[in-house]
Each structure stands twice: as structure tokens, then as C-alpha cells.
Image (cartoon, helix red, strand yellow):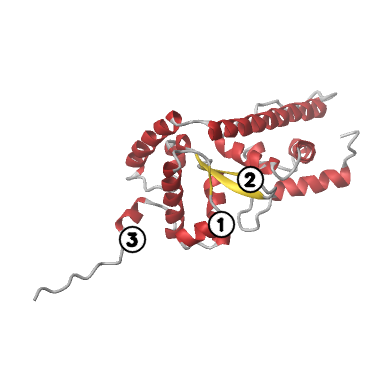
Amino acid sequence: MEKEKVEMPLSVNIIKFQNYLLAPDEVVLFEWFIVKSISFKYDEFYYGQQRIENETRIKRTRQDKIINYFSDFGIIRPQVRKNATGGSVRHFYIDFECLCDKKILSEFINPESVTKFIQYFKYHFAEQKKNAKKKPQEIYFDKQKVDNLYNLLNRTYRQRVEKYNKGKKTGLKSIVQMPQSKRLDDKLLRLSEIYDTETIENAFIAYVDKVLSGDESPNGILNYFLTYNLENKEWGVFNEYLNYFTANYSYTTS
């Protein structure tokens, strides 16, 4: 009598994990987002935290930490939107163009595997462009919002430098254009979802004045200003200088 076959219940591909420089739950959520984006035809999609947890077994707090980590690279773009009942829900958009960037990909993919990942993501980026419809256009609108804020902060920086240099003959500061990147764009967008433009500008004024006085020496002016602590979920530098502005500046004479 032929023995009955025993179905093998294991499905995790341990060897595939060697392609990554990530923790196992980060790999699971990364691939989960890629698969979901493709299944939604590369469009923005909504998934609740509980539903994600049910499908990945990753708890909510850990989800947030991993999503924020990928968001810092511009790979995942969470968008908080109002639903039909007036509540807030979080949608996700996966940027395959960003995933084609070797410098970004090398942060969490094994160097020996980067090339094949780029080839894979280039194919899906091309498909994403073909299928770009309503939702990606809304994200472009958000990008315009970020561009406006970026330009405002550059103008503010120029004005503070001009004010600092006024009347000085030595020790003059040069005016530079702050670099812009997808990573910084995403941080600006997330910050703008919490604070209004005037509040962000006020904190930036106090921060830039400290940079010009030599009390702060950041490697990147905007990058340091947008420092975000994943553990505490705090905008440390921004909050520090918003408090400093409130305590030491007049809104009419700043």
C-alpha cells in the first residue's frame, strides 16, 4: 500500500534572505509592500494596520518603525487622507523609480545582489509609468507642496545670511542653495502634515541663526534640521528650535 504523501508546510526561503542587509521582519514588510503595489497596478492603496498585521504578523509599533525607515529613503510614501466618514486613513505609494537608485538600494540589499534587484525594479518602474493615473497625479500635487516649502526655506536662509552679513567687513557667510533629494522631500512632506508653513519657517529661522553664529555646525543644513528619531517619533532639532523661537523671537521682528 502506497504511503500517503505528507504535505510540507514550510514556505520561508531562507536562502533568499541572504540578498538583504535587513532584519527578517523588515524583509517581510519590504516584499509585502512590493507585491501589494504590483497587485494594485502600481497605484496608491489603503491598508489598515490591523490588516497588515494579520497578513505579515508584524505588530503595529514595529510596522511604524519599519515604514518610517523605508520612508526616509523615499521608497514608501505614506499619505494621510480623509475617508468618506471624515476619519483619517493612511494610504501607501511605492516609488519604483527610487528603488532603481543603486545608492539607496545598497543600504539594505547585499552588494552581490544589487544589480539583479535594479533590473527587476527597472521593469516595474517602466510598468508604473505606463499605469500612472489619478493617484500618482495627486502625489505630484504633494510634491509641488514640498517644492514650495523647499523654495521658501531657501529664501529664508538667504535672507538670514544677508541679515547676518549686513554691516560686516570680515567673517561674511556665503549664500548656498540647499540640496534637495527624495529623502528630504519625504521628510518635508511629513513635517508639513503636522505643522503649518509659518511654524516650520519660524523654527528654521531660529535654527539658521544658530548655524550662522557657529553654535550649530551641521554637515547638511536642511538634513540636520529634519532629523527624525524613529524610536521616539520626534522631530528633535525642529522641536528644539521651535521652542527657542517662541521663547526668544518676536513674530513681528524675527
- Figure disc tally: 3
Measured from the top left, where is residue 134 in percent x and y?
A: 54, 32
Residue topped by disc 3: 12
Q: Are marks 1 and 2 in contact (CB under 8 Å)?
A: no
Q: Which residue is mark 2?
A: 80
- For the residues bearing labels 3 and 1, Cβ distance under 8 angstroms: no
Q: Horizontal and vertical percent for residue 114?
A: 36, 42
- The residue shown at (68%, 43%) is 191
- Cα gap from disc 1 to disc 2, whole angstroms: 13 Å
Vertical relation: 115 (above or below) 51:
above
Q: Residue furthest front?
A: 84
Q: Are marks 3 and 2 in contact (CB under 8 Å)?
A: no
Left or right: where 177 falls relative to 161: left
Within the image, what quadrant is residue 190 found in? Answer: top right
Q: CA distance from mark 3 to mark 1?
A: 23 Å
- Above or below, 12 relative to 96: below
Q: Nearer the viewer, residue 62 or 229?
A: 62
**Position of residue 208 measured from the top left corner of the image (x, y, whole percent):** 75, 37
Q: Marks 3 and 2, how far apart in space?
A: 33 Å
Residue at point 63%, 38% (across, down): 220
* Residue position marked by numbered label 1 in the rendering: 49
x and y percentages locating residue 155 in the rendered image: 74, 26
The quadrant in which the C terminus is found is: top right
- Looking at the rendered structure, the kind of residue marked 2 is Val
Which of marks 1 and 3 precedes in the sequence?
Answer: 3
- SS at mark 3? loop
- How crowded pointer 1 is (Cα within 10 Å; few <14, some 14-19, many 20+) is rated as some
In the displayed structure image, the side of residue 197 where residue 109 appears, left or right: left
Q: Left or right: where does residue 143 sit relative to residue 101?
A: right
Q: Which secondary structure, mark 1?
A: helix
